[in-house]
Amino acid sequence: MSDSELLALVNEAERDAVRYSAEFMNENENLLKRYNGEPYGDEVEGQSQVVTSDVQDTVESDMPSLVRIFLGSKDIMTFDPATNSDADKLEAEQKTKYVNWLIRNQATSFKVIHDWIKDAEIQKLGVVKFGYEEVERTEIDEWDGINEEELEIIDIQLKVQSEKGVKVEYIEQADNDDDTKYIKVRQTFIDKRFFVRGVPTEDFIISRNAADEDDAEIIGDTSLVTRGELVAAGYDEAIVKQLPSVNDQDEVSTMKAIRFRDQGGDKDSEDISHWASQLIQVFYLYVKVDYDNDGIAERRYIVKAGNVILENEQHGMVPYAINSAILMPHSAIGRGRAELVTTHQRVSTVLTRNILNNIYNVANGRVVVNDEQTNIDDLLTVRPNGIVRTEGDPTSAVFQLQTPYIGDQALQVIQYWDSLKSQSTGNQLANQGLDADRFGEESVARFEGMSKSGAAKTELVARVMSETGFRKLFDGMAWYVSRYQVEDLEIMILGKPMTIQPLKWVSHNSITSNVGLAAGDDEAMLQNMGQLFQILQQLKATGSTVTDDKKIYNVMVKILGSMGISRIGDFANDPEIPQEVLMAENAQMKGMLQQLQGQEDPLAKAAMIEQQGKIAVAQGTLQLKAAELEEKRRQANVKELADANQTIADLEFKYSELELKFNTDIPGQGQGA
């Protein structure tokens, strides 16, 4: 397929995306306006213009629970072993810990996940993009007033950097008048990293009527990139200079202007004089297309700007994860929690404005006046103890125009609408509408039931997000790690080092969600796990085969995790780690020995001798393991010392070469040392 044919197909698919649906974007813009409490546009000058915060209240009441669930100490998702083999169990454990660590323990993790969840609460969907990238980073260093020896040493250091894959360029070299030198060097580093980034709703592209991310004919995003960044990414400079600037592009939404309205609105797209700083709208698209004309459409990664395709390659993963607070059947795009209360906010705003206008009229009542019998100047002059002169009966000349107070009736209507909103969102007030005299008659069960009903809705939102967006994110990140990370990596998990070996990941593991399992919040989890812990201890004491030490330890891990404790090893020994078990058994035997030593009974002495024998065996085993560890440590130290000596010898040789070459002595180095 030619580039022109491919471009035509891509443009056609892109134009059919929901991003270009006016109805879809208008709905999202309206939802964001309602969250921000912006005016509706029908406000009347001189009357109340208040806007109630129903949408914002609903979203913000959900956020603490959702953040605690997805950014707490517990793993969100667990990779299950493909088989019962030790290798598959190890792979599943590594994937679980490493992918959780990659997604939730980076510098930007909290902000990205928080914004992702909040997008899904306010708007119809929240989107993140994930993957692997190699980013160029440039540093420029200058040295001035250096002599030949120092220059030689700098050259050696830069050569070492070059051997590590750093691109080294000498930008400028000059001789100074005092026989010293000046050099300027550019070093270009390649940072390799996995990333998760939020995608604004207005920049996300997905086919209409797609059931999910993988079903979409086209999926991707667009962003503004400078011409210089495109050149740095490896695209041809001549082509980049011909691309249309952002001023030539049509905006499909005012979402950015709404989002940044309190900061003065979206930035102006003014012409920038230097070409490298001019902004280009670039589309990063994953399109299903039969590019090789074999009758089967494959997913291709296409980068385009204007009508120019900058990149085109086959790609096996759609690197986007979509969250919606409320799922809609057979649709990738659902609904946000904000959508449930936009009507309530509109009605509440109208009722509140009417109440306030009524109060204003009552507090600032008008009068009816007969201007033939009243001195109008007196009436219009407001002063303490002022007088109003009238002719005849004052009550027939001036009297108050009565404005009936409607607050009581309006508040009943507001209360009714609040009850409807509570039923929709689950954010109910347990004591709403209760008579004070009957308050004590309400059972605790009623309040607990209402609380659980509200929590159940939030729990359902968490489960929906976990089973859709987060599942896709975890599965996709594991896919990228297994293909792009070739080096082993050591990370700290629960206070202990874990070595990750992605090259040994060969299984496609199923994933289990640990969120929204009807286990309640951390307090309920603590209570449930505490009861389970007691039951397992009782079963173990009776000799039951239903449980064992490992299962009891797993319950303790859950309890400590619910308490926010990550360093499990500080409080419990893992029965599958021999060193921890051996130390615990040794401590137990020493305690038993101390007890037995205080007894005179012959049977006790015999038992003591038996225990001493066990202790001796255990201590011997411990000493043997300690000796093995010491020998491994000694061998490592010997190797490290040998490597260090070799490095020193290489440096000494290099310094000696410099001394011979320049017929000088470097203090403390080379042959002169």
Image (cartoon, helix red, strand yellow):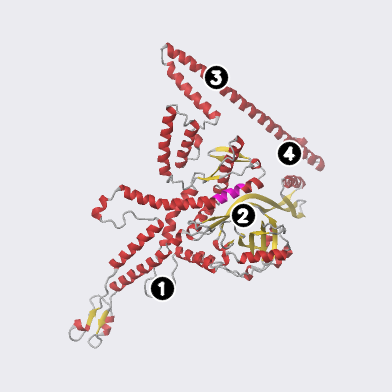
Measured in 3D between alpha carbons, the distance from the residue under mark 1 to the one under mark 2, in whole angstroms, is: 46 Å
| Camera-nearest residue between 329 and 4 | 329
- For residue 47, side relative to residue 203 (left or right): left
Measured in 3D between alpha carbons, the distance from the residue under mark 3 to the one under mark 4, in whole angstroms, is: 58 Å
* Quarter of the picture holding the C terminus: top right
Q: Give the residue pinned by disc 4.
A: 667
Instruction: Report the mark closest to the observer, 1 or 2.
Output: 2
Q: Which residues are magenta?
A: 471-478
Q: On residue 318, which mark appears?
A: 2
Q: Give the residue pinned by disc 1.
A: 43
Measured in 3D between alpha carbons, the distance from the residue under mark 2 to the one under mark 4, in whole angstroms, is: 61 Å
Q: Residue at x 45, y 65 (%)?
A: 34
Instruction: Report the mark closest to the observer, 3 or 4.
Output: 3
Most distant residue in the top direction: 602
Q: Earlier in the sequence, mark 3 or mark 4?
A: 3
Helix, strand, or loop for circle 2? loop
User: Which residue type does callout 1 highlight?
Assistant: Glu
Helix, strand, or loop for circle 4? loop
Helix, strand, or loop for circle 3? helix
Helix, strand, or loop for circle 1? loop
